[in-house]
Image (cartoon, rainbow, N blue to C red):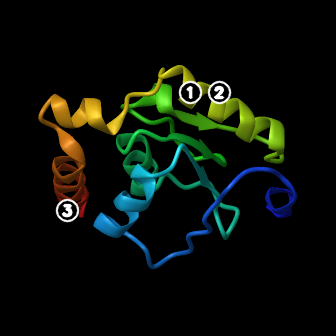
């Protein structure tokens, strides 16, 4: 991820510990979310959907499974992430192809509703 420091991209590094509404507030101000696994193991995490629900394009390392919803906003890459990959995601964001959080809210789903539905789905699996 060191390549980010030498680019014109503005970014915030978010480690574990930030979640829920605080994370959604950060995502709402973002264009692209990079999902990097600390343990290098494929994992599909709820924050991938949260980023997409907040209107971001999500670039993720292998997830182990494809997303069931918001597929147009979630991109799985293989190999090394680089500047060109991030710029490509920014172009996708700027074309308006991913569904924006404001569109979700206007359709009565909203990020808060999304979080409640996601929490409920996770609890149902336990």
Quick one: 43 or 53, which is closer to the camera?
Answer: 53
Q: Depth-wise, is mark 3 or mark 2 nearer the camera?
A: 2
Q: CA distance from mark 1 to mark 2?
A: 5 Å
Residue at the spot 17% in from the left edge and 38% down from the top edge: 109
Given contact means CB atoms under 8 Å apart, are the residues at marks 1 and 2 in contact? Answer: yes
As drawn, 36 above or below 88: below
Q: Which residue is mark 2?
A: 91
Q: Which residue is mark 1?
A: 94
CA neighbours of label 3 inside 10 A, class few (<14), some (14 to 19), many (20+): few
- Quarter of the image for residue 90 reads top right
Given contact means CB atoms under 8 Å apart, are the residues at marks 3 and 2 in contact? Answer: no
Q: CA distance from mark 1 to mark 3?
A: 35 Å
- Quarter of the image for residue 110 reads top left
Residue at the spot 48% in from the left edge and 25% down from the top edge: 72
Find residue 103 and report its horizontal and vertical position in percent. 27, 29
Find residue 45 and report its horizontal and vertical position in percent. 45, 56
């Amino acid at each position: 991820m060191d390549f980010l420091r030498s680019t014109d991209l503005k970014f915030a590094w978010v480690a574990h510990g930030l979640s829920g509404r605080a994370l959604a507030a950060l995502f709402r101000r973002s264009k692209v979310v990079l999902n990097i696994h600390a343990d290098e193991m494929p994992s599909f995490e709820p924050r991938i959907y949260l980023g997409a629900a907040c209107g971001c394009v999500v670039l993720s390392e292998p997830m182990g499974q494809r997303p069931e919803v918001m597929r147009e906003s979630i991109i799985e890459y293989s190999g090394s992430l680089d500047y060109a990959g991030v710029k490509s995601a920014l172009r996708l964001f700027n074309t308006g192809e991913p569904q924006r959080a404001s569109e979700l809210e206007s359709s009565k789903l909203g990020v808060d509703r999304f979080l409640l539905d996601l929490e409920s789905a996770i609890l149902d699996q336990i």
